[in-house]
């Protein structure tokens, strides 16, 4: 399929720049895949929209403040460092205990191997040295502090890694972004972007869902380059998905397996939960595999979903792998789901829905 087919026009005023004052005040577009119809609802309607016995599967990854500011030691030129989640067997420390991390770097010129960068605000002078260029996988940096000290530095000086379409002045993240670009159930640090479908949930909404006997399970997928990298290939099939680390507990695997065996719906909260479930399903055994590892699963038309019966997700960027995922889910095993999704997106624009990370949501049933 041509990537250009997944393009659509979105004027800037539809891109949510700030979260709503209340997480669960977002609007919800409910899409019926079989009838090819939609209804305008609210996130607060979820307890009535879902069924008793449905299993909601959340991603409990926690966003780390991964964007750092630095200057080039020689010239004083500004450098942005965007730390990437370590892969399972990736070296994260040198023999003498200093931190080593992959990162995306951006500056006005070209960084040289061995060049030293001075990080902003580091007590005692935290520095990083460019050790290796890894192409699309980023740069490998060596730091003057231990991994534990680097984690503390990031918590104090790091910025929330908001997507580039959310405009903020350079400098420390606001308390609003630090609190709201994080789900209320985040537990496992490691993501460099939020699982944004989960941002709509509040303790009160979770309690209302539990009262309606909607069940809940959690998996972990540390959101990295694989989720948000732009699809630049001319053909959808030629796009490369970067691997991301997942963890599926025995309890989560058992809950999903039991729900499928009993004919109850598995409702994935977000594209990352969707990818984790589909990647870890064992079709021969008809069960979800527990364990940890990496997945580069690329869900695009025509994919036939094995686990997910419904997906709660936000509105996605043009030409993104996430838009391709929902187009595939809109018509499993076929390629005609994209037209339905784009028609629904046009309706959402006409109704003033808010798009992307801090925006409103869709429920595909």
Image (tube, rainbow, N blue to C red):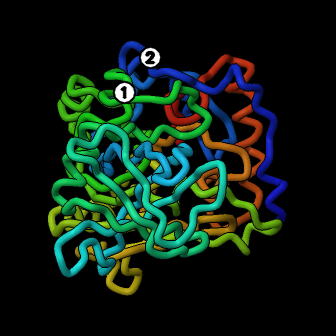
* Tag 1–tag 2 contact (CB < 8 Å): no
Q: Nearer the viewer, residue 342 or 215?
A: 342
Tell me: residue 268, above or below residue 354: below
Residue beneath the point at 48% across and 65% down:
115
Instruction: Give the residue furthest to the bottom.
Output: 284
Q: Is residue 310 left or right of residue 205?
A: right
Q: Please state which of residues 191 and 346 is positioned toward the viewer in this rendering.
A: 191
- Going by the picture, which residue comes out furthest to the front? 74
The picture places residue 33, in percent across and down from the top left corner, at: 62, 47
Residue 53 visible in the snapshot: no
Work out which quarter of the rendered image holds the N terminus and state it.
Answer: bottom right
Image point (62%, 22%), residue name = 353
Q: Is residue 108 left or right of residue 257?
A: right
Q: Which residue is located at x 42 percent, y 45 percent?
A: 67
**SS for callout 1:** helix
Residue 231 seen in this snapshot: yes
- Front: mark 1 or 2: 2
Q: Could you classify mark 1 by the number of other residues whose Cα lies within 10 Å: few (under 14), some (14-19), or many (20 or more)? A: few
Q: Which residue is mark 1?
A: 48
For this view, does 307 lie left or right of residue 124? right
Instruction: List the residue tagged with mark 2.
Output: 20
Disc 2 element: loop
């Amino acid at each position: 399929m041509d990537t250009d087919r997944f393009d659509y026009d979105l004027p800037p005023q539809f891109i949510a720049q700030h979260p709503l004052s209340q997480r669960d005040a977002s609007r919800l577009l409910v899409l019926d895949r079989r009838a090819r119809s939609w209804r305008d609802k609210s996130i607060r309607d979820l307890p009535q929209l879902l069924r008793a016995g449905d299993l909601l599967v959340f991603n409990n990854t926690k966003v780390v403040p991964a964007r750092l500011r630095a200057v080039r030691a020689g010239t004083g030129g500004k450098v942005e460092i965007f730390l990437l989640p370590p892969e399972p067997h990736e070296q994260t420390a040198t023999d003498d205990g200093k931190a080593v991390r992959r990162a995306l770097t951006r500056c006005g010129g070209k960084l040289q191997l061995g060049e030293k960068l001075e990080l902003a605000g580091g007590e005692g002078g935290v520095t990083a040295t460019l050790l290796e260029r890894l192409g699309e996988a980023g740069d490998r940096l060596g730091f003057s502090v231990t991994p534990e000290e680097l984690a503390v530095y990031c918590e104090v000086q790091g910025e929330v890694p908001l997507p580039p379409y959310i405009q903020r002045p350079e400098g420390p993240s606001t308390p609003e972004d630090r609190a709201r670009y994080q789900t209320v159930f985040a537990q496992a640090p490691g993501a460099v972007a939020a699982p944004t479908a989960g941002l709509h949930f509040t303790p009160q909404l979770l309690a209302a869902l539990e009262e309606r006997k909607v069940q809940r399970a959690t998996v972990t997928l540390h959101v990295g380059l694989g989720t948000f990298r732009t699809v630049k290939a001319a053909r959808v099939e030629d796009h490369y998905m970067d691997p991301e680390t997942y963890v599926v507990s025995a309890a989560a695997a058992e809950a999903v397996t039991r729900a499928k065996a009993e004919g109850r719906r598995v409702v994935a909260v977000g594209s990352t939960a969707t990818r984790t479930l589909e990647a870890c399903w064992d079709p021969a055994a008809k069960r979800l595999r527990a364990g940890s590892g990496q997945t580069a699963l690329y869900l695009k038309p025509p994919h036939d979903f094995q686990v997910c019966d419904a997906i709660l997700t936000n509105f996605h960027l043009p030409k993104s792998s996430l838009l391709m995922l929902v187009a595939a889910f809109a018509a499993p095993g076929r390629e005609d789901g994209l037209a339905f999704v784009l028609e629904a997106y046009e309706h959402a624009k006409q109704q003033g829905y808010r798009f992307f990370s801090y925006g409103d949501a869709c429920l595909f049933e």
